[in-house]
């Protein structure tokens, strides 16, 4: 039997808190690039065309992150079927919509409209069945879905959902030509839209959308213990360190070496890049499709519970 934990996820939206970091700033030692990944073209849901950038191959290296999908097309045949009802247990999904509209509904009674610039942060916990369906028949639909693992003590927590509209995501301008949308974590003294108690959610995720209006540089502090990667979805960038300067082209993911206390990114005019980092859980990963647990026995229990209709209660 799987014991259900009663701890409830804490997901809070910040009030755009700005912290004076000048007195505590330390010299930034930039990380270098360990590996670049192109991603795999695939389809999911009801035939939605997407690129799977972070796959199971890199789950252990990029712990606590399990998957990153990038979907984007102006052809309704590529996205019109959406993602009908499907289950999740044991992790979180973070969906960031760049363009388009998608309706979320789940078995916990939550419903929300994900649209341009908004984020849906869902904690599946002990189990939820949900759907994500397009609310458009033409035009561009583009976005990302990140799967974030839960620690063992939170895998059976109560499901939770947060619908963050674009105007609730804090933005900071560290340079007059660089805009940073702080979805989670903290950047240059600006606290992100999502922040949680580290005692319940030790991953302490950083999720930034960095946009270069002109060619310029951006620096971001990173916890030396955290795994980190970036994904370029417009233009191109370079990661600069003392050892090397590495160019990252469009639609490439770059895994950053676990060295240094930050990253220095030099972006071309119009470049846009996601920067994501977090504390590794260092726990076993047992995955069967939309279920991510720690043991095979827990996976079998998840399948049995889903078939018994327990995700709908």
Image: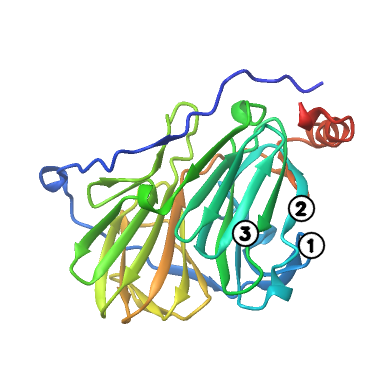
Whole-number angstrom distance, CA of label 1 to CA of label 2? 7 Å
Quadrant where the N terminus sits is top right
Instruction: State the mark number for residue 46.
Output: 1
Q: Position of residue 243 (x, y in %)?
A: 32, 72
Q: Earlier in the sequence, mark 3 or mark 2?
A: 3
Whole-number angstrom distance, CA of label 3 to CA of label 1? 26 Å
Q: Position of residue 312 (x, y in %)?
A: 78, 31
Q: Quadrant of residue 32?
A: bottom left
Height in image: 160 above or below 120? above
Badge 2: residue crowd in 10 Å (few <14, some 14–19, many ≥20)? some
Q: Position of residue 131 (x, y in %)?
A: 71, 48
Of tags 3 and 2, the one toward the viewer is: 2
* Residue depicted at 65% across the width and 31% down the height: 155
Q: Which residue is mark 3?
A: 58
Q: Locate residue 232 relative to residue 47 in the image: left or right.
A: left
Q: Which residue is mark 2?
A: 84
Q: Locate residue 271 relative to residue 118 in the image: left or right.
A: left
* Residue depicted at 63% across the width and 60% down the height: 135
């Amino acid at each position: 039997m799987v014991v259900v934990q009663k701890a409830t996820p804490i997901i809070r939206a910040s009030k755009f808190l700005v912290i004076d970091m000048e007195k505590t700033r330390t010299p930034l030692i930039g990380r270098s690039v360990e590996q670049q990944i192109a991603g795999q073209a695939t389809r999911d849901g009801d035939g939605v065309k997407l690129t799977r950038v972070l796959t199971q191959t890199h789950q252990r290296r990029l712990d606590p992150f399990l998957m990153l999908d990038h979907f984007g097309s102006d052809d309704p045949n590529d996205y019109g079927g959406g993602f009908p009802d499907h289950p999740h247990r044991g992790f979180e999904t973070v969906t960031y919509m760049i363009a388009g509209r998608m309706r979320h509904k789940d078995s916990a009674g939550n419903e929300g409209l994900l649209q341009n610039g908004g984020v849906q942060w869902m904690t599946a916990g002990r189990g939820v069945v949900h759907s994500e369906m397009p609310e458009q028949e033409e035009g561009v639909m583009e976005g990302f879905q990140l799967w974030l693992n839960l620690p063992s003590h939170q895998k059976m927590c109560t499901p939770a959902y947060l619908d963050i509209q674009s105007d609730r995501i804090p933005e900071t301008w560290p340079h007059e030509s660089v805009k940073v949308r702080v979805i989670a974590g903290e950047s240059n003294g600006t606290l992100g839209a999502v922040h949680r108690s580290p005692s319940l959610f030790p991953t302490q995720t950083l999720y930034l959308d960095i946009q270069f209006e002109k060619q310029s540089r951006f620096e971001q502090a990173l916890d030396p213990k955290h795994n980190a990667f970036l994904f370029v979805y417009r233009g191109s960038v370079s990661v600069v360190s003392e050892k090397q300067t590495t160019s990252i082209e469009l639609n490439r993911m770059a895994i950053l070496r676990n060295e240094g206390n930050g990253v220095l990114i030099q972006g071309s005019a119009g470049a846009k890049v996601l920067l994501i980092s977090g504390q590794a859980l260092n726990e076993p990963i047992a995955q069967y499709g939309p279920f991510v647990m720690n043991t095979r026995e827990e996976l079998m229990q998840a399948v049995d519970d889903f078939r018994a209709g327990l995700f709908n209660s």
